[in-house]
Image (tube, rainbow, N blue to C red):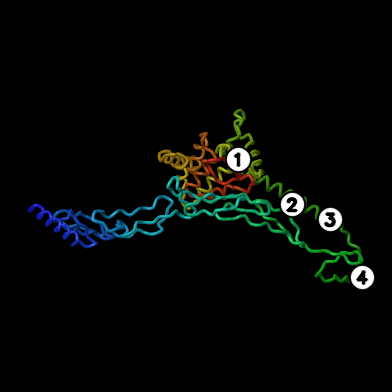
Amino acid sequence: MSWICFLTVMMCCQVMVKSACDKEEYDLNGQQCCMRCPAGSGAARQCTAGNNTACEQCVEGSTYSPNTSHSQPCLNCTKCPKDAVVKTPCNTTHDTVCECAPEYFFSVDTGECKACEICPGGWGISVQCSYNQNSVCDSCPNGTFAREISFTEKCQPCTVCTSDQKMLQTCSPSQDTICLSVPIYSTNPGGKYHIPNEHPIQKEHKPREKDIDIIPLYCAILGAVVVGLLGYVILVHYRRMKEKRLVREPHEDVEYSKASGGDSGIYVEVEHQQKGTNCAIVTCATRIRDLPQAKKRELERCFSQSACQTEWRGLAKEIGFNSRKISGFESKSKQDSVIPVRHMIQEWSKSDTATVGVLIQALKNIGRLDVLRSMHITDSTELQPLNMNNPQHFVL
């Protein structure tokens, strides 16, 4: 009977201890009430027999604690990953909230921010790029057009020429209609043309003087035309000879005659033919060494005239060169006074994996999409969105 009384007393004591703890405290094995650390502070030492919980204040912008707890310490604030920006900064009670930078979206598959799809000319945005949605491009239907490479431009309706305009060029998926205003002519009952809004020309009756011989005037005009044509031919020839003296590098697609021992003249003719060509159709699989020499020089110019002239190093790393190889290009440049990016492109062109597709992806990765426009990516109905998984046609 005494044991039953003893157990009853002990149970009553435990109930009394439990009921004595506040809601901000927790019961430690029925022996004592321990403090809970509020949000914004973490448990530096957990509660034990004889020692209460020790709390410490979290550091603003460095650590945080979102909940009331007797065991959880302050947590480190999250740092936003690459291509992401801070939406809400970290404080003592909330972690950092990150979002993808403009023109990037969050990929659920990879858990990373990826660049939004670019719609080329002839293709318009049907779904805008957002936080977790890539942009979707659709080809412009008949009666609409999209002129530029853009992240945001939709297909616009084509212009319709009015009755007092003449259509010089019809609308295409990448070009709007071109209209030209022309004066309207009408005929009067006498059958003669009449120009509206024009004052009639009053003829002055003057006494007829001695007839003027116009043959010498015609001869003078003809002579001036002949002299002008000769001057134009001489100027073109001078410019061609000047370019030939300044540019002495052999073209990559032409083999010089070993027997001549000098300049065969083939380079100038090939370069002249290339300048006369409007565009060359290539694909993502086209090798860099097969590109026209002028396009390679344009690529060099974009990086040599950049505000940050070491930006070509980023391109070199994207296409597979290590730091030692990049330093070698700079050393060679100091020896022969040639820009290092030219040495890099010449070395890269030797590889079969050096293709236009790899170049385009590398330029996208370093944020130099302006180089694509500088290399004259023009409008084409065959041009598809820039997707490296499916090689498409580009016009350079």
* Secondary structure category for the residue under label 2: helix
Q: Please name the residue that numbered disc 2 is placed on.
A: 228
**If you read the primary sequence from the N terminus, does the residue marked by circle 2 or circle 4 appear first?**
4
**If you read the primary sequence from the N terminus, does the residue marked by circle 1 or circle 4 appear first?**
4
Note whether 15 is above or below 359 in the view shown.
below
**If you read the primary sequence from the N terminus, does the residue marked by circle 3 or circle 4 appear first?**
4
Foreground label between 3 and 1? 1
**If you read the primary sequence from the N terminus, does the residue marked by circle 2 or circle 1 appear first?**
2
Relative placement, left or right, of 296 versus 105 is: right
Q: Please name the residue that numbered disc 1 is placed on.
A: 282
**If you read the primary sequence from the N terminus, does the residue marked by circle 3 or circle 1 appear first?**
3
Q: Amino acid at mark 1?
A: Val
* Secondary structure category for the residue under label 1: strand
At 59% from the left and 45% from the top, the residue drawn is 384
Characterize the local packing of mark 1: few (<14), some (14-19) or many (20 or more) Cα atoms within 10 angstroms. Answer: some
Q: Amino acid at mark 3?
A: Tyr
Q: Position of residue 198 (x, y in %)?
A: 81, 70
